[in-house]
Image (cartoon, rainbow, N blue to C red):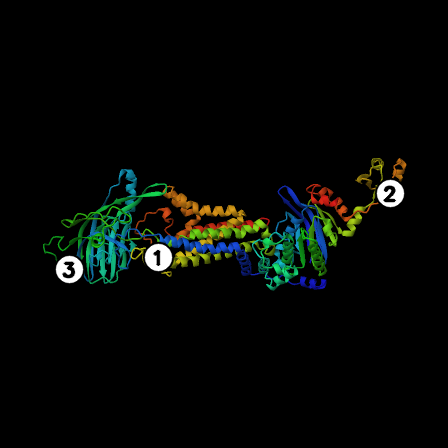
Amino acid sequence: MTIEVRGLRKRYGSKVAVDDLSFTVEPGMVTGFVGPNGAGKSTTMRIVLGLDAADAGTALVGGRPYRTLARPLRTVGALLDASAVHPGRSARNHLLWLAQSNAIPRRRVDEVLDLAGLTTVAKRTVGGFSLGMRQRLGIAAALLGDPAVIIFDEPLNGLDIEGIQWIRGLLRSLADDGRAVLISSHLMSELEDSADHLLVIGRGRLLADTTVRELVTTASGDRVAVRTGMRTEAMTALADTGALATITDGETVTVAGLSIERVVELLTRRGVTFTGVSAHRASLEEAYMELTRDAVEFGTAGRGGRAAR
Amino acid sequence: MTATAHRAADTLPDVDRPSFARLMLSEWTKLRTVRRWTVALLAAPVLIILVGVLTASSSQPGALDSPLVGPDGTWVQDRFHFVHRPLTGDGTVTTRIASTTLEFSVPPEDGGDARARDVERTVWSKAGLMIKDGLRPGARYAAVMVTPGRGVRLQSNFTTDIAGPAAGAPTWLRLTRAGSTISAFQSADGLSWDPVGTVTVPGLPQTVEVGPFVTSPTATLLAQRQFGSIRLGQYPTTTRAVFERPTLEPAGAPGTGSGEPSDGWQDDEVDDSAVQAGTPPAPDRAGGKGPQAAPPPAVWAGDRLTLVGVGDIAPRTPGEDVIKQNLTGGYAGLMAIVAVAVLFVTAEYRRGMLRTTFAASPGRRRVLAAKALVVGAVAFVIGFTASVAVLLITQPIMRDNGFLPPVYPDWSLTDPTVSRAIVGTAAVLAAIAVFSLALGTVLRRAAGTVAAVIVLIVLPQLLASGLPPVAGQWLMRLTPAAGFTIQQTIPRYDHVPRICVPENGCVYDQPWAGFAVICAYALVTMAVALWAVQRRDA
């Protein structure tokens, strides 16, 4: 079962949240949905779940609009906001009403409590739960109906190492079961080890629909890093050719669009001394940073910018 | 689980939607699993009972004047001027009423001519023919009469009233007895007769008194109001009626044999205030001026009989509705119910829980309907059990405080009016709960919604006493608290005028009319809410 999004558009007032977005989430793998804060990830997920209405385009789950599913929890398990539970209700009762609404047998509640490691706190009210416990409860709720499609919005947010490892293991096994798994994050590093496929989104537009490896390869391109004590001279020499040169740290100038041989030639001709020249290998984080540079909604002070440094 | 295993599951046909009952079960689980809500819901019946018991303990009946009862035990008044003769067995009495004149005075400060027209419009003075079981006040009777503005009427045993032709004096009237069946007729010329109606007066003895009668009550009208107080205007009236040729067939025992038309007719004032020898004279609840002086005796001029009457022949009702009063706690109980009903939906908006709900059940209108039914059913059960409990607890208290028959008749839970008040209270609470939930859905804010509902219910009660009576009454009629008129248990008689003071609960004559108002609030708001949840992004 897949998630298919075609030509999706959504605006809130004058703000365009999603702009002509199309992608497919395939079964049997974990698809990472990544983009800066405000890029439209949560909006897209809400539209897929039939919560918000799209202005244009379609979002289908297993070939059907979500709202036509009779017992949606048995098809799609979603975690949008771990805090969206009434603090006065116990974990067990929260799962119980959900199960009842989709005619899911009561014993399944205990099964998912056990799966999420919440059995011992099942009777405690959610108000006293830590964020990590709430994430676990949200995931337990998503798994209630044994769904073929999983949608988690920022599932790793606020989790400790143990929790992150638990979710990574869970996502892997869910994908290995043949389920379609879509998880979002604004941090590429969170998805680096878990996602098989990546959807990069910025300002509501799809920036990349690719695998992790491809993204790194494309982004590193033909960039050359030069270690030199004469940064200014090196910049001038390289910029004269029209190439984009940037100072990346105290002793390094990075240039894009020139081969390593051409760089050496240019520097030698101008008499710029250098201690090293290397073809630059970008990290996934940098690749992502480059993709979304123009799309960072809240400026470089946002977490997306800081994480890329 | 393997990939293939899950692919197999994918091919399962999408099963039917879960039944509506399951959705309700789910919403019920939500409602009962938040402890604060459960506590508030349990507080509701406690409040209803507590307020009811406090009200009952502190209430005293008004001064009892004349606890005269009619044939069926109803509290009645029975005073009129009667010119009569005995009739044994079946017979017919006929007369022409040449004229009736209503006399009264209105002090100029009460509004003069306009007020005088109000009195004429309101007062049920009666002049006509009567068949009565002797002269004892409260005894069985049937009578045909002309009334100002309400045409010819046939009345019997105080509570029965049948409307006849819309004729007035001068007119012919006739009353015929056949066993316990009495028929009335009216005629413009004394030749062709139109039936007015037929009544059965069971237990009428072989010999009865028959003849012309006149009575004329004291009109009571709202006179004036200042903030929080009301003055009632009392306007005693007198009616002078001229009868021509009253005749009884068969004539029965002759009188003195003088041959005069008046021969054999006796002149008596039937007066309920006179027979209460043991009771000290107490002011009439409505009047406050004491009984009127007896009218002058009947005057015969040939076959013309001039008869002046004061008083009334009618059922009486107490000022306090014992059942409604003891169910006052409904107002207190509904505060708790309103709060929970509002939070039941606004809590979902506040925490984004609504997304979880609508993701689990995309049929949003079904979800909202299930929520409304659950919260309505809970309010109904609370209202029903608390009403039954409070009435059972307060019944002996009220009796001890002197609320006794005939003024305050005995009642049981199974009396139709009492059952209606109980079920009605429960239904009103249910409707208000649904209204609150729907408004909460539309507004999406708890504080604003609760404030709006409470203001809508309580404010009219406070304002009504300060507004002109008509404005106050409409305010009460059009706001949700009108629903509580369904608690009315005092019988209303169309042939007994009633002064209507809105803050005393006189909102609608028909108990169901007020209930319809709150139902309209609930349904309209619910329709808006259903439209809104479907249209809005969750």
Q: Amino acid at mark 1?
A: Ile
Q: Report which quarter residue B400 is drawn in.
A: bottom left
Residue that mark 1 sits on: B397
Of B199 and B484, nearer the camera is: B484
Mark nearest the camera among 3 and 2 is 2
Report the disc number at residue B252: 3
Looking at the image, do the residues carrying marks 1 and 2 touch, with CB atoms under 8 Å apart? no
Numbered disc 3: secondary structure: loop
Q: Residue at x 37, y 55 (%)?
A: B323
- Quarter of the figure with the N terminus of chain A: bottom right
Q: Amino acid at mark 3?
A: Gly
Q: Report which quarter residue A250 is drawn in.
A: top right
Provide the chain ID for the residue under circle 1.
B
Residue B530 visible in image: no
Report whether B68 appears left or right of A147: left
Report whether B97 appears left or right of A171: left
CA distance separating discs 3 and 2: 146 Å
Residue B363 placement (x, y as % from top left): 58, 55
CA distance separating discs 1 and 2: 103 Å
Report whether A178 appears left or right of B170: right
Residue A281 visible in image: yes
Mark 1 Cα within 10 Å, few/some/many (few <14, many 20+)?
Answer: some
Of B288 and B127, nearer the camera is: B288
Residue A143 placement (x, y as % from top left): 65, 59
Residue that mark 2 sits on: A276
Residue A159 placement (x, y as % from top left): 67, 52
